[in-house]
Structures are given as structure tokens and as C-alpha cells.
Image: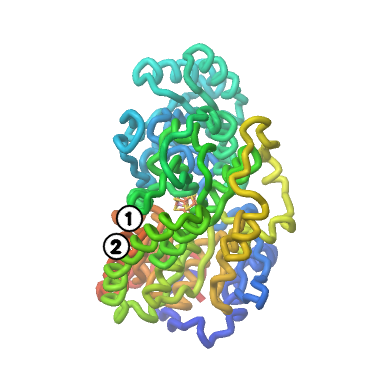
Amino acid sequence: MAMGAKDKPVEGIRLDGQDPEKIKARLLAKYPPKVARKRAKQIVVNKVEPDGDVPVITSNVRTVPGLMGQRGCCYAGCKGVVLGPTRDIINITHGPIGCGFYSWLTRRNQTDPDSHGDGQNFMPYCFSTDMQDEEIIFGGEKKLKQAIQEAYDNFKPKAIAVFSTCPVGLIGDDVHAVCREMKAKLGINVFGFSCEGYKGVSQSAGHHIANNGIFKHVVGLDDTIDEGKYRINLLGEYNIGGDAFEIERLFERCGITLVASYSGNSSIDAFANSHTADLNLIMCHRSINYVAEMMETKFGVPWVKVNFIGAAATAKSLRKIAQYFDEPELTSAVEAVIAEEMPAVEAACAAVRPRTEGKRAMLFVGGSRAHHYQELFNEMGMKTLSAGYEFGHRDDYEGRKVLPDIKVDADSRNIEELEITPDPERFKPRISDAKKKEMEAKGLIFGEYEGMMPEMPDGSMVIDDLSQYETDQLIKMFKPDLFCTGIKEKYTVQKHGIPLKQLHSYDYGGPYAGFKGAVNFYKEIDRMVSSRVWQYMRAPWQEHPELSATYAWE
Ligand code: CFM
């Protein structure tokens, strides 16, 4: 039944005071029983026990066919997310042209070709083998070889990476054999990824495949230990809207040396050398924890979770670095930077707070930001009523302590787990177990991510792999002041008269990381939730009910 003109929008309600279980039941009411049973395990009312335990949430499972989800594909996670931001690798999409086009600079990951390296930057280009019927029928390996040769002849890059799209897996092209052959022929690093779009259940599979590939083909190729004190890698920061630039500015001010960034503003040489760093910082746990784990096992580099989204979180993360290196000089530099940067942040926050205080947001983003951005909203006095990931795993929700309990299903088993052992010559634990224990007693926890749910209030709704239908229902029930997702949801949400902030691409804004980023974010969100323009909004279907979607609006 389509919504008729007589159907009034349901009164907006607040989660506060409402029985969240009833709200969950309303979200599920229209689903067929089998779908409702499955979704019920992915829609969870949060409750944090005194020991930090939270309810189990099903995640990283296939989307129910027919539900409109937000996810991307394996190829998007491998090529678009993890390898895409590296400027001096030529990334060739082996497949039809559409896959190449839609991974071409659409993520707003920025780079500064002059920051280190030799200024090579291939990110503005789009490289594709442009497969046609002929290659689909007779095989595409020949064309791939030609493409690699042509890219080499024209650009003389240090490295070429090849990314398989769905048809490549279906017809069985051996991209790895082609890459080996071309590597021997050209004398540069050429490596391939079997990241066909259909692998796994989301782009998360592509992250894992990308991590494996970088680790196998690049990490550890250059043992030079460059100068610099407090040598760290920043993992899982992709420089969307210039976030990495702001974080790099803070490192520089504190005297911290960034060896490699995975992979915002990155170069292949930095990856090759990254195992020489003394600490790995993980920003986005979902997309890159594999590299951190493998680097620790093979080379002895420990990792800590950080978050540079939110001013307080930024200060906390900088202090973690100082705690780890445990040098008075670094500790005082970090404290001085925080003391200098915070007044401007506090002033900006105080200026917007009278308007943002108490406003209600919902966040459904990727596998990391739905958690991190709650920090910024808390600083502004805003409440996150409901949040969830598109493709996070249980550890991203509930914390890594549940890792041993996660059942590995057939989809995950499909993704290779590399067998990593300590490097016979280069394994060097950066700190002793005794020192690690001592630091942990003081609150610096290694190799741990506590996840999103323990930090969310009881009664908030945590929803994995949110569907378009559920989005509409949530908006109707809650009338939030702000919704945060991506471009695919933006305009349908705005047609409800609710402002939508894209937390993938940041719309046209950013940076939002670090101290300066926090100020940008406060101002942007203030503008969005304080604007009166949304209340004048009339969706086309309100004037013309015949335009409405075909599902029932209750
Ligand atoms: Fe990590 Fe990301 Fe995210 Fe992600 Fe992404 Fe992204 Fe994201 Mo879009 S790597 S999981 S696959 S923080 S592209 S920079 S915004 S969904 S929350």
C-alpha cells in the first residue's frame, strides 16, 4: 500500500522514555518471518554490564536479498579503500570499465606528492583493462599484459598493482601469474589481488585481501632505518578530506616521526620500510588490523588503538604515544601542543553548544566512523540515539575480547589467512613483556580495541547493515536532528526533511580529524542542525502521493 495524502507522518518520538524493544518490534513488523528472525539478531538494544560486556550482535553476514543495504563490494574495499590512496602505485582495474570509473577518485582521499618521495602521483588517473566481450569469452590475460606494459612505458612507475573484478574470477584469468611474468620482465614490483567483487559479504573482505597483498609483496623490502625519533606508523587513516594532513601536522609539532601511513598520503617506499617503526597506531581497526597483527608477529612491532576524531580523543591518542616512548622530552612536547591547541577548540565548541546541546543524531557508517564520530557529537552535547556499521565485525561492536567466540563461516573462510611467523633475522620485540605489563598497569593497553557498544548508553539501538526500509522507519519514528551516512542515502533522508551529513566523503568539507578538524566539524554540524530550511521541506510524494514508494507506510 502506498502512502496516501491522508496518511499523516507519525509523530516524532524520542528513544528516551520509549521501550526500545517495542521500537525494534516495529522495525521488524513488516518483514516476512524468516527475514525478521535474521534482522532481529542484527538489531540490538544496547546494555553495558559493569564488566564491559555488551549483547551479542550478528554482523559480517550476507545481506538479505531484496533489502537495500549500504554496502560496497570486495573490489571496492581492496582497490578503492586500502590501495587507492597510495599515490605512486599504478592501480590497474582488470575488468569492465564501470568498475574502474566508480573507484576513481570518488572517495576524496587526498595526497601531497611533494611531502616525501619523488613527486609521482597517479591518483588522478583511472587505469582499466576495459574488458570487452572478446576477453570475457577468450580470456583477458593477454590484454592485462598489454595494459601493464603500456602503463610501464608511459609512466615508468615503481610498482603496478592489478585488481580483479567479478568477471575475472568467473572466467579464471590468473592475474598472479601475469603479474609474476611482468615483474620479471619489467624489473619493477608488480602484484595482483584476487579481490573479485563477489568475494565475502562486503568491502570488508577486500580490506583483508589488500592487507595480505601489501604484507606479502611490499612490507619489509627496505630495512633502512631513517633518522627520526619516536618512529611510528599510522594505520587505517585514509586522508579523506585532508584528515591525515591535520594528524601529520600534530605529529610534526610533537616531534613524532611518521614512517608510514596506511594509506592516506602514502607511498610504496614507506610501506616497504614500515616494519622499521617502533609502534603501530590503529585508527580504523576494521580495515587494517590484519597488517598490525602480522607486523607484530613477524617483526615485533606492537600496536595500540587510537582515535583522532574528537578533540579529547586526539589529546588522549597523542598522550598514548608519549606514554609508550616514555621520554620526558616527548611527554612535555605533547602536553605543550595540547595546551596550545585546546583553547581554540574549546572556544569553538562553547560557541556552538547552545544550539547543538541535546540535538539527536543517528550514524550508520562503514566499519569505524559510526563509533569514532560519537566522540565529536558528545563534545557538542549531542546524543547518538542509534548507530551501526555497514560491514563491521563483532569485534568492532563488542571489542576484541569476543574474537575467540566468532564463528568463521564459509564466506570468511574464503578469504586467505596468511601464516605468519617471526622473521628469523628481523624479529625484534620493541618492548619486553615486563615493560608491556608495566605500561598496561598504567593504562596503556596493547593490541586491544574495545569496540563501539561499550561506549554507547544503555537503551541506544545498535543496528548492523541497516536497510533503506529501516532508515525510513527510524526517521519516521524518531525525527532525529541529523542523520549521518553516505551518498546513497543522502537524498532520500533529506526528502524526509532531515539534514544528512556524509561521513564517508564529508560532502565537500573536512578535515574533521585532530584539533583543527574538530573546529571544522562543530561549525559544520551547527550550521546543519540550526538551519530552518529543513522544516520547509515538502517531499515530492507529500504533494503527489502517486510518486511514493510501493511499500506500506503504516
Ligand atoms: Fe575504515 Fe575508512 Fe571506515 Fe572503511 Fe569505507 Fe571510508 Fe567508512 Mo566509507 S576504511 S571502515 S571501507 S574508516 S570508505 S575511510 S568512510 S565506509 S567508516
Q: Measured from the top left, where is residue 375 in percent x and y?
A: 44, 68
Considering every residue shown, the one lying at the far bottom of the view is 17
In the picture of the structure, the residue carrying the numbered disc 2 is: 520
Q: Nearer the viewer, residue 532 or 214?
A: 214
Q: Is residue 13 above or below residue 64?
A: below
**Mark carried by residue 548:** none
Q: Measured from the top left, where is residue 542 in percent x and y?
A: 35, 72
Q: Nearer the viewer, residue 522 or 231?
A: 231
Q: Is residue 45 visible?
A: yes
Pointer 2: residues within 10 angstroms few (<14), some, or many (20+)? some
**Hey, which quadrant is residue 401 in on the image?**
bottom right
Left or right, 404 with reference to 111: right
Kindly identify the residue that appears in the image at 49 percent across and 72 percent down: 474
In the picture of the structure, the residue carrying the numbered disc 1 is: 511
Q: Measured from the top left, where is residue 135 in percent x and y?
A: 52, 21
Helix, strand or loop under label 2: helix
Q: Is residue 154 above or below residue 523?
A: above
Helix, strand or loop under label 1: loop
Three-letter residue code for mark 1: Pro
Q: Is residue 428 above or below residue 392?
A: above
Mark 1 and mark 2 in contact (Cβ < 8 Å)?
yes
Kindly identify the residue that appears in the image at 51 percent across and 76 percent down: 554
Left or right, 130 with reference to 449: left
Q: Measured from the top left, where is residue 478 in percent x and y?
A: 46, 78
Left or right, 412 with reference to 8: right
Mark 1 Cβ inside 8 Å of ligand 1: no
Question: What is the image's colouring?
Answer: rainbow
Mark positioned earlier in the residue sequence (2 or 1) = 1
In space, the residues marked 2 and 1 are separated at their CA atoms by 7 Å
Three-letter residue code for mark 2: Asn
